[in-house]
Image (cartoon, coloured by chain):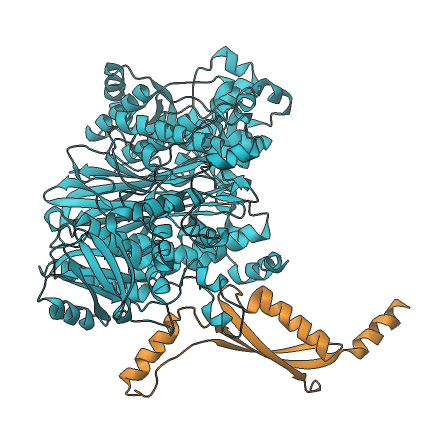
Amino acid sequence: MPADMSADKPEVPLVAIDQRTLDEVALSRAEYLQILELLGRAPNDVELGLFGAMWSEHCGYKNSRPLLKRFPTSSPRILVKAGEENAGAVDIGDGLAVVMKIESHNHPSAIEPYQGAATGVGGIVRDIFTMGARPVALLDSLRFGPLSEPRNRYLFSGIVGGVGGYGNCLGIPTVGGEIYFDASYSGNPLVNAMCVGLMESGKLIPAKASGAGNPVLLVGAATGRDGIHGATFASVEMDEASEERRPAVQVGDPFTEKLLMEACLELRDTGWIVGMQDLGAAGLTSSTVESAHKGHAGIDLDVSKAPRRESGMTPYEMMLSESQERMLVIARRGHEDDVRALFARWGLRSDVVGVVVDEPVIRVREGDRIAAELETRLLTDEVPAYVRDGEEPPELAKLWQFDMSSLANSLPAPADALLKLLGSHDLCSREDVYRTYDTMVGANTVLGPGSDAAVLRVRDAADHETDKYIALTTDGNGRLTWLDPFNGGALAVAEAARNIVCSGATPLALTNCLNFGNPEKPTVYYQMSRAIDGMAAAARILETPVISGNVSLYNESFGTAIYPTPVIGMVGLLEGREPVPCAFQAAGDAVGVLGPWSVTPDTLGGSSYLAEVHDTRAGRPPQLDLEIERTVQQVTLAASAAGLIRSAHDCSDGGLGVALAECCMWSGLGLHIALQMPEDVTGSALAATALLFGEAPSRIVVSASPENWDALSALAEARGMMLTRLGSVGGDRLSFPPLLDVPIEEMFTTWRQGLRPFAETPEAEQAHVRTDRIE
Amino acid sequence: MSETVTSEIVGQLQRWQARVEVTLKPVVLDPQGDAVLHGLHQLGFDAVSRVRVGKYLELTLAAASQNDAETLVRQMCDRLLANPVIESYTFSVEPGNPPTA
């Protein structure tokens, strides 16, 4: 038998290649054979490096591309669809467009948290201004392991520091984001940075290289050995020069980025260029290949003309370096000196390093020697796409059967549970984090961090105020997606849209960052596939097409995958009226809940209550009904457009109890609930717990002046949507007899203190924390 | 009894002076160094072609021997004074002056 099997094997490859070489470029043997077949010869080292980079998940989306096709991607407002450019663009009227994208920098942040997060911000900002848009806002969605572990505290303070350190220098406000903690992120934190830009819709700069003879310029920082995967380092003998060759952690230089941004935005209006592409992952390789491919042309590149930070760099290293703050500019022939003069005025170096050619190839020279020559098609269209078989994680069925009645004997008093939730790391105030960010620079932030959605004033191209606002948010819940991938994906989109709607804005489009484990594991692939289905279903119904995104796979440490964590970034538009705040506004206002009223114990499935109070992550999360969700959002929008509501805040983590507490704490105004309680609630502590902390979706807490209440009720009723009146704003307590009666002051103190011990003393903290780095 | 032991140990400790230099690893980008270089060029010091900025620390510590003192300083560098992912350090340890009365 063994003899027969070996006879069936494909032919022995033309050229022997050892596994280590393949591992270094992260290609499988099957992929290498495919390359041999496509090329008709063996690739040299540089060419193999180009294949490795372009066939990676990060550049080639080989595991996710077939799944991403399930997303809805168009609407009449979409100007640039997903995948067409560095980021998507959506029309907001009057010749203005919003450009946005979210991107991960998880692995670099796990190694060097400050620089990893900083260069993550730098990378996403470049994606936006590369298109000719001015970046106006940053949001950051972060996940960490529990802060009880020193290493996680070190990552937390480093990453938060890096986000602020880079963003603050650029003069772009950080207006929102999320932070969650779970053991599944220990050793593999998530850093997803989102940037939003504004531009005149006609001024988009494409990321393409076209027009044979047009010069290709490399602009900005010199190239060093930053972020190269270490192939050359590992394949040479160790000697005294080894330290010099070791691949380096990328270090960000925000001041250079600021100069690059201003120079590129000035360049946009000159007419001297045909395209521009930033250098991100896989540096010169991906920027030249992708822009040439997009322009149906080729690029002939001489790496010896590119400025270097270090001596002795090989073409391989030049092509794969991920040095930051660099940009590829394709100028119109004859304007290269104009372009160079413009950059020089901003104190930036620029060099002509290549030329656009007619043939669809990427040719890498080092002086006269050709180091690599490949058809761009091989690095783009020919990237393999894997459709794998998913397999439902075996633990799901058991987790779903978790019996809530088993909690009946261990339920704390509702007030104690509420305070525990408010003080928990997942739900407490993030102020100690975002106060280190510049949230106001530019003076357009109307609602900043801490609101359901951030709201920014829109200025036009002449820097005049308009009557438009954009609303921005990020959302994603790994625990819910782990417990129910389809539902978790749908909930992330629904909650993002609900947050936008609470501010009074209409959701327009979304960007997403798909953080998953190793897709070669059938259970991880299942999570990814189902979560994408859920996101796609919600995005369709809520009319928020996907305009950009990023995929981060292999997020595992010690062989265990992170919670599947799709993160949604969303933009909405508000025109001609003021945004709606989340907090209560005036004593005497009527408070109600818009949306289905559910008190069944199973709504505790996957809830923050279970996780924080009972240290249990189980149950099936309440199912999202997309039609109900859409109606709730439409009624809320109609009510805010008619001026009927004074505040709106969605119920999510911690359920109704936490949502009401937040409305009180943020305003300093109490709430007295005078609700005729159904008997099954007053008689059952479990039902009362579910009422307060169950996380049934599609619910929004609204407040309205009493004279508007009837109109609001009529509006809801006309759409068949439930509106339950809870009580009235007033006093200094959240009182919900007979369940709950807590002073606002007590809730606020608990909530406000949650992260303070970890956000303040970074130096002392580090001393504590480095300990485990060397153990 | 225990008091005697403690005072004996203290009696054996000596005072040491450590000098620590922390620098970015050679291949790591140094924006601060680049800014200093740029400033020097603007002042006309064209002779300068490269600047790397690091930090210098002086520590006074007590240890039973030079070897112990070096071990302590190395631990301090690994845990706090340097970031081993992007920085290297060197240090020297010398007998320190007796405390002034």
Q: Which chain is cyan?
A: A
Query: In the rendered view, does A92 fall on the left or right side of B56?
Result: left
Residue A85 appears left or right of A124: left
Position of residue A615 relative to residue A764, above or below, is above
Residue at the spot x=74%, y=80% of the render? B14
Q: Residue B94 sits in which quadrant? A: bottom right
Residue A675 appears in which quarter of the rendering? Answer: top left
Locate residue A528, reporting x and y percent.
41, 33
Asked whether the viewer can see residue B95, the reply is: yes
Which of the image's four quarters has the N terminus of chain A? top right
User: Is A10 above or below relative to A487?
Assistant: below
Find the residue positioned furthest to the top: A679
Residue located at (86% from left, 71% from top): B5
Decide if residue A729 is in sight here: no
- Residue A279 on image: x %, y %: 29, 57
Q: Position of residue A645 (x, y in %)?
A: 27, 29
Of the 4 image quadrants, the one containing the C terminus of chain A is: bottom right
- Furthest toward the right, the residue is B1
Expressed as whole percent of the image width and height from the top left, the position of residue A576 reads 15, 38
Chain in orange (letter): B
Residue drawn at x 47%, y 58% as measured from the top left: A112
* Above or below B93: residue A44: above
Q: A442 or A88, which is in the foreground? A: A88
